[in-house]
Image (spheres, rainbow, N blue to C red):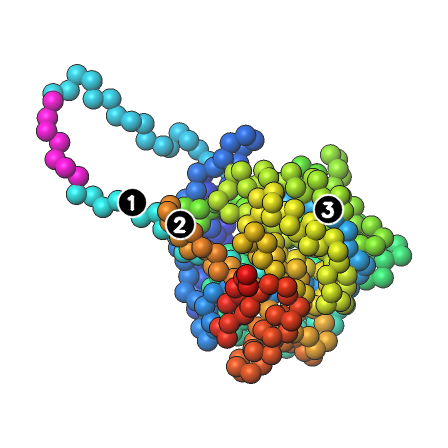
Amino acid sequence: MKKKKLVILSVLLCFVLSGCGSRSGEKVMSLNAIDIPEETSGEPTGSGRQEEGAGLPSGSTAGEAADGEEVSGGESGSGQGYNNQPDSSSRPEAGDTKGTEAAAEPKSTQEPEDTGYDFTMCFAGDINLDENWCTTQFMSAQENGIYDCISEELVTAMQEADIMCLNNEFTYSTGGAPLPNKLYTFRANPERVEVLHQLGVDVVTLANNHVYDYGPESMLDTFDVLEEAEIPYFGAGRTLADARKPLYLEIQGKTVALVGASRAEKYKMTPQATDTEPGILRCYDPELFLETIREAKENSDFCIAFVHWGKEDSFELEEVMPETGRQYLDAGADAIIGAHPHRLQAMEYYDGKPIIYSLGNYWFNEETLDTMLIRLHFTGDDASSQLTVQVIPAVQAGYKTTYASDAAEQRRIYDFLEGLSPNVSISDEGIVSEVR
């Protein structure tokens, strides 16, 4: 079983993940979460890139999301994590040579500093660990737990991503009471957080319509459980300032910002946080989320916006989704990742940047549905950069999510996604390209 340890060392938090039993070897990663002071930006530190998943195409992939509830709207939030302010006192000062003898300095033979980077982020949609939900009950009856529910190829891809993020579509608590008149309410025992470690999850978004299902007490418990498990989160918080706060991660000298918001309920039962009460960041009115994205981009090299939106059980986009998605890209996001409809939906490029409208269900119920992981592959140096998007295709069926290993099955899923999408093509390796 894989365990993650978060070590706070002055200016950084290092997430070190050890091996996962008989599974795909170790994930050892230096992933630093930092706090950017207002009006300033942090200085990135490095982190090593992992190998690509065995048996899977290399590139970037998509996951699915769902949450068994109402429709969407538009407000947004960003995240809270384990943040630590960079310490400028450790930076060396320029030396003072006044009063020293003049001497001929030999020419430096040192090679120029390598400013290149090459890392991946992986995104999955909804999972549900509610104690009374069908997937959790199925998992509890399996000899190998979650490993008998999600195929090894997918688990390997999740573990080997430099940053693995999913939609945490429930609350961790034994307290609270279900919200009155809410059709579906999801609550997992706190020890279920270990499943995230087993899957290699590094961060989660809480900007969804189920994290508050058992009221403020259970939401506060959820924050405590994730913090104790050393899994940073974004899109919700103890106050509105926390919910809006971007989660900054440093990897290979680059700063990545994650922000999240939700507009997923016809009857708005999940509250936006206030100055004194916990909640999520909403984006029914997108202005707060747009401000959050602008702040995040100003203080990072890359900004990813994770939005909970759309109509459930539908392959069709709501009109507000492309409208606001493009606004989020204009505000500075480098990619948009979406969840909530329980179905795969379109992808598109706008101004050269990707919008993945819905990851669909990743591991959420017994329905037979196409799903995916989305892998974002960042490469470049000071002179140029490239973001490659890749689909890792899978199928959810009968309480299991299985990698689509057959080439014909992969092509079927790619063709289905192309048919939904206005301007993308997907290669046989799952690489998503803009069609101009």
Residue furthest to the right: 181
Residue 104, x across and y down, in percent: 10, 29
- Which dot marks residue 36? none
For residue 107: magenta? yes
The CA distance from mark 2 to mark 1 is 16 Å
What segment carries the magenta color? 102-108
Callout 1: SS: loop
The CA distance from mark 3 to mark 1 is 42 Å
Q: Give neighbour class at mark 2: few <14, some 14-19, many 20+ (Cα, 10 Å).
A: few
Which residue is tagged 2? 384
Residue 167, x across and y down, in percent: 65, 58
Q: Give neighbour class at mark 1: few <14, some 14-19, many 20+ (Cα, 10 Å).
A: few
Which residue is tagged 1? 113
- What amino acid type is highlighted by mark number 3? Cys
Callout 3: SS: loop
Tell which tag, 2 or 1, sits nearer the viewer: 2
For residue 381: magenta? no
- What amino acid type is highlighted by mark number 2? Ser
Residue 21, x across and y down, in percent: 48, 70
Instruction: Mark 3 or mark 1: name the one nearer the start of the chain.
Output: 1
Position of 138 with respect to 6 (left or right) is: right
Q: Pointers 2 and 3 in contact (CB under 8 A)?
A: no
Which residue is tagged 3? 283
The prevailing secondary structure element of the residues shown in magenta is loop
Residue 429 shows in the view:
yes
Near-viewer residue (119 or 436): 436
Instruction: Mark 2 or mark 1: name the one nearer the start of the chain.
Output: 1
> In which quarter of the view is residue 386 placed?
bottom left
